[in-house]
Image (cartoon, grey):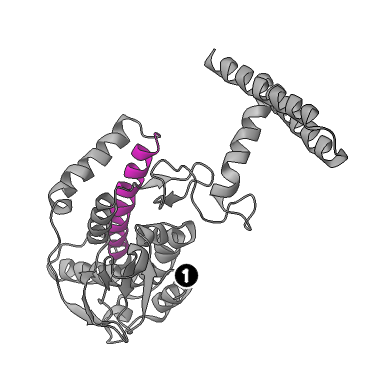
Amino acid sequence: MMGFAQGIDICYGSTKNDRNVVFFQDGTYRDYRIGGIIEEVLRDEVVSLITKDTREIMVSVPKEEFSSGKRIPAPIFQILEDFSVRKAPAAGALFRTSLYEAVLHTMIREKNGETEGSFSIECYEYFLDRFMTFAGFVEALAANNSGEADEEVSRVAELFENWAEGFCDQSPGQCGELCEPGKVPVYTYRVIGWLQLLLLEYSRIRRQNKLIKFCANCGRIFVPQKRVDAIYCDQPSPQDPQRACNEIGAQIRRRNKRNGDGAEHEHHNRICRLHNMVRRARERGDGKDLIEYYKKKIDAEMVRYEAMKTK
């Protein structure tokens, strides 16, 4: 039936810079940074495909399309194509296996006389429930780590962490090996479901002392790679796609703060004026004494500003 419950195989830490390799069933593979698969799966356009677009197509596909011996019903195949092998291959592969699980589960329930609604709706709801459980846990962890969680969300994050505790403290069993072209065989972990992916990824993230967070500029899920206290992701910003959030996020935050705070605005004007004085003095070839005078003014302004912030 359909023949697409394949999943992905992940080899953790098998390349330089401690990156992970995902092997796909067609023989291709791709490098992911730590937490990168979760970042890919929860991108806005991918979530839209997995939820909204999938529902619209699922309800239009007759049950016979799933059991007639075809590998993939044409409308579902179009969703897989929309994921784009280049842009979201891991998300597409897990979508494929999760949909297979949902169809199989619904067929068994129907055979046992346990279904209540239409085949397509029951299938979709089972599929969606699994994905949203995964997404809910990730978002709760991100909110907790970003200081945005209320009491209820913190409880959800704690629930997942307690559930994952035993798994994260152990090394998952080796479950097969693949041979990367031109290299020696490597041990891999077969992943066929959303929660299984989260457990493996979360274990890896925690072992590397990293965190799942929300970007303070664009709101995306991300895993800081260099500094655990980073608040901006390194993806293209909504304000300027040519620049990443971690390039312009701090500038935007400072500008917004100045616009709403008279003291901040005054400090910004003073410090910019003094730096311009230093620049112009150098361009004119003025003596070192004058340049040093302006620099002392800058230092004095910074002392005044820090004292103002303390108050």
Q: Quadrant of the C terminus?
A: top right
Residue 265 visible in image: no
Q: Nearer the viewer, residue 290 or 219?
A: 290
- Residue 220 belongs to magenta span: no
Q: Residues within 10 Å of mark 1 (few under 14, many from 20)?
A: few
Question: Residue at point 16% right, 46% down?
Answer: 163
Q: Which x, y percent locates residue 234?
A: 50, 54
| Residue 290 relative to residue 22: left or right | right
Asked if 222 appears above or below 256 in the picture, the reply is: below
Q: Quadrant of the N terminus?
A: bottom left
Q: In terms of secondary structure, what is the magenta stretch mainly? A: helix
| Residue 178 relative to residue 213: left or right | left
What are the residue bounds of the magenta stretch? Answer: 121-147
Residue 47 visible in image: yes
Question: Residue at point 48% right, 56% down?
Answer: 44
Say which quarter of the image contains residue 228: top left
Say which quarter of the image contains residue 174: bottom left
- Residue 123 belongs to magenta span: yes
Q: Amino acid at mark 1?
A: Lys
Q: Which x, y percent locates residue 167?
A: 15, 53
